[in-house]
Amino acid sequence: MSDGEPRPLEAGRRRTFAIISHPDAGKTTLTEKFLLFAGAVQQAGSVTARAGRRATTSDWMELEKQRGISVSSTVVQFGYRGHTVNLLDTPGHRDFSEDTYRVLAAADAAVMVLDVAKGVEPQTLKLFEVCRSRRLPVLTFLNKCDRPGREPLELLDEIERQIGLAPAPVTWPVGEPGDFRGVLDRRDGSFVQFTRSAHGATVTDEERTGGEEAALRHGTAWDRAVEDCALFDAVGADVDPKTFLAGESTPLFVGSALTNFGVRHLLDAVVDLVPAPAPRADVGGGPRPLDAGFSGFVFKIQANMNPAHRDHVAFVRVCSGHFERGMTLVHGPTGRPFTTKYATSLFGSERLTVDDAWPGDVIGLVNASNLRIGDTLHDGDPVTFPAIPVFAPELIAVARPKDVSRYKQFRRGLDQLAAEGVVQVLHRRGGDPSPVLAAVGAMQFEVLVHRLEHEFGAPVDLEPPASRAVRRTDPATASLLEGTAGVEVLEREDGTLLALFANPYRLDRIVMDHPDWLLDPIVTT
């Protein structure tokens, strides 16, 4: 056996996927229940920050525990059915859609969680559009079926109309919304009885019966589910691996993550349907073979995950080869050697030393201060993977330290948070030296203010964020824009020039008058 042969074999055992949803749909609860069913935790935690309950495994930031929401992505690795599963938990709030986009660049598929009472909410449709634009395979989970909600058939139509995915139900609810009896499994026509465990903290046995017994128990509720599934059969709404992998259809499951019902069905589907890592294309479009030398790219940087360490971690998606702790790699942007002595496997905020990793895995490189989001690391033949796009910000604010004696801490904190992608830090090319902060949503500023004070000891005064139209530009266009009424040109710390317009109408007018000027809504890292 050659040295390269084990690599595709190990990669074939990997499943790397992200979970996306709108706020309060149950994404973080589902993450916790995946860990429970995989045996990675013995008891599920609470998804809220109520007194007397612990926070979820994947929520590590103090602000997350206080607010009961996820505002940062994280990584959890666990074993299930002989496979290694890399679960990338993403923020649910649209203000952190950039973080979600970066995570999706490292995923091979996504699980989309929808609240049956709310369906696809317009404010977070952008998260789902990212998956569609990347043609990522998507599994769908209709959550909270045990509570009152909308008609499931109506939700299927909404998924297809708004997201552009053709739903293929695998399990289907028996009973009206709020009177949930269980599910009809279309794969064998059986009925799975809805059961609850105490607070959903432990795994309960699944009660599965035949259709005849289900009809006797549940009468018209079962008959209606059978009729719905007959309709799916008639229109060919079956799981099709080809259209699923092409990002055109979505296998759909129903259940209740809080009560653990339907979670095992979905986790089994992750192993059975989510594709194993495939050769990833480089900037030239050529695929990097799985058995080539090691390669990976940084998709996230996070500081102070563990307050006891006060360090920062670069998250690297392994694309090819075999990673071994201590190996010396090449840092693509600089060509300099990079040692990997401090490599970790991640489980929320907890970390374990990792000795090796394979394509599809995510490793954490500790205190890798020279790494930036989008950087490539490689061994052997050089490779550069496509940059991770960053979209133009929509809100602008100016931050000033409340205590000027803490200015060094203020600057260090801003530099770190900018490297993580929490905000973009801009500078005027003259005049007020105070850094200008740019973000997609207002909650990014909340996170920045909280972390500057509690992690870096630098409380700040922040101007009320103002909405502005922002576009990337180049030096030639910048020189033409300078002095133009209603326009200001600022420079990001990496040298990228951004043009800030007083309002969208000013931007539209200039684009109309000068179509040859560079005003790009995509700001690439």
Image (spheres, rainbow, N blue to C red):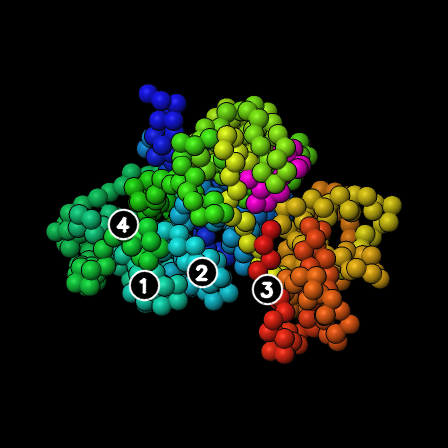
The location of residue 237, given as percent across then percent down, is 23, 59
Q: CA distance from mark 1 to mark 3?
A: 35 Å
Give the labeled residue for mark 1: 156
Q: Residues within 10 Å of mark 3 (few under 14, many from 20)?
A: some
Which amino acid is tagged 2?
Glu
Say which residue appears at 32% left-offset and 63% top-offset. 156
> Which residue position is annotated with label 2?
129
In depth, the one of 524 and 208 nearer the eye is: 524
How far apart are the two marked residues, 2 and 3, measured between alpha carbons?
Answer: 19 Å
Q: Amino acid at mark 4?
A: Pro
Seen in the image, is 284 located left or right of residue 484?
A: left
Distance from Cα at disc 4 to Cα at disc 3 = 37 Å
Q: Quadrant of the N terminus?
A: top left
Magenta includes 499? no
Tell me which numbered mark, 4 or 3, is placed earlier along the sequence: 4
Q: Residue at (20%, 63%) from the top-left corner? A: 235
Report the disc number at residue 520: 3
Residue 413, visible in the rendered structure: yes
Outermost residue to the left: 212
Q: Of marks 4 and 2, which one's residue comes earlier in the chain?
A: 2
Under circle 4, the secondary element is: helix
SS for callout 1: helix
State which mark lies toward you, 1 or 3.
3
Secondary structure under the numbered disc 3 in the rendered image: loop
